[in-house]
Image: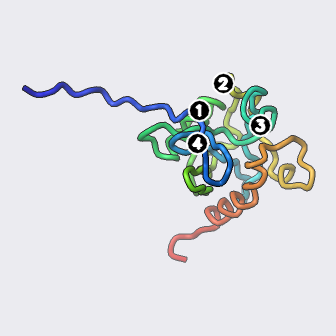
C-alpha cells in the first residue's frame, strides 16, 4: 500500500536568528527585499520605492525597501517579490530583476533583489499592517548628506553598494 502524498506546505521564516556577530536578524531562512527603481529616457535610475515601516516593527518609523523573512523552500528572489507584493502592492510581472546583492553573516543572510520597473513609476501603495506608507523617492535625495527621511540603518549602510551593483547591471553589455 502506497502512502498518500502530503501537500507541499511552505513554512514561515518569521522569527529571530541569534548570530555569532552578536546581533539578532529577522528570518529563520534569511531575509530578502526588493530595490525597485525607475529609469529615465537615458536608462539612468532616478527613483526607488521605499516603505515607511510600521512603528511596532524593528526600527519602526524608518524608510527602507519592502522585504522580510524568506519562507522555507523559497528562493531569495521569490521572497523579495512576495514581500514587495504583500507590503507595497508591487506586481512581480511588472518588474525585471537585474542584479543581486547578498549581505552575509555567519548564520544568516540578507539578499537585495535589484530590479527595474517595466513601466515608469508603476503604482505602489501600503497594502498591509507592516507599512505606514509606500512611495517613490528620488535617488539623489537619498544619497545626499542629509536625506529628507530617516532611513532604516541597515538600508542606509548598504545603499552605496547596492547602487554600485545597479550601475554595473545597467551598464553590462553581453560579451564585454
- What distance separates the C-alpha of mark 4 from that of mark 2? 26 Å
Residue contact at pointers 3 and 2, CB within 8 angstroms: no
Local SS, label 4? strand
The answer to whether one can see residue 45 in this image is yes
Count neighbours of disc 2 (C-alpha within 10 A) and say few if under 14, some if 14 to 19, many if 20 or more: some
Count neighbours of disc 4 (C-alpha within 10 A) and say few if under 14, some if 14 to 19, many if 20 or more: some
The residue drawn where x is 60% and y is 55% is 105
The residue drawn where x is 80% and y is 37% is 62
The residue identified by callout 2 is 127
Residue 41 figure quarter: bottom right
The residue drawn where x is 66% and y is 59% is 166
Q: In which quarter of the image is the C terminus?
A: bottom right
Judged by depth in the image, the label closer to the viewer, 3 or 4, is 4
Q: Which of marks 3 and 2 is nearer the N terminus?
A: 3
Mark drawn on residue 26: none
Q: In this view, does 5 lie above or below 94?
A: above
As drawn, which residue projects farthest toward the top? 129
Q: Is residue 169 above or below residue 35?
A: below
Judged by depth in the image, the label closer to the viewer, 4 or 2, is 4
Mark drawn on residue 17: 4
- What distance separates the C-alpha of mark 1 from that of mark 3? 21 Å
The residue identified by callout 3 is 59
Between 36 and 154, which is closer to the camera in this rendering? Answer: 154
The residue identified by callout 1 is 85
Local SS, label 3? loop
Count of numbered tags:
4
Amino acid at each position: 500500500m502506497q502512502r498518500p502524498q502530503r501537500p507541499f506546505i511552505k513554512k514561515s521564516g518569521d522569527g529571530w536568528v541569534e548570530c555569532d556577530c552578536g546581533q539578532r536578524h529577522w528570518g529563520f531562512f534569511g531575509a530578502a527585499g526588493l530595490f525597485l527603481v525607475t529609469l529615465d529616457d537615458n536608462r539612468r535610475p532616478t527613483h526607488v520605492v521605499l516603505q515607511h515601516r510600521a512603528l511596532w516593527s524593528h526600527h519602526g518609523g524608518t524608510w527602507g525597501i519592502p522585504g522580510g523573512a524568506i519562507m522555507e523552500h523559497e528562493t531569495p528572489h521569490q521572497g523579495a517579490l512576495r514581500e514587495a507584493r504583500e507590503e507595497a502592492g508591487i506586481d512581480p510581472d511588472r518588474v525585471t530583476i537585474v542584479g543581486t546583492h547578498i549581505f552575509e553573516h555567519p548564520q544568516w543572510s540578507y539578499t537585495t533583489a535589484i530590479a527595474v520597473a517595466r513601466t515608469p513609476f508603476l503604482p505602489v501603495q501600503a497594502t498591509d499592517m507592516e507599512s505606514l506608507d509606500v512611495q517613490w523617492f528620488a535617488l539623489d535625495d537619498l544619497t545626499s548628506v542629509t536625506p529628507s527621511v530617516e532611513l532604516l540603518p541597515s538600508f542606509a549602510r548598504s545603499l552605496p553598494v547596492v547602487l554600485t551593483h545597479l550601475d554595473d547591471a545597467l551598464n553590462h553589455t553581453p560579451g564585454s
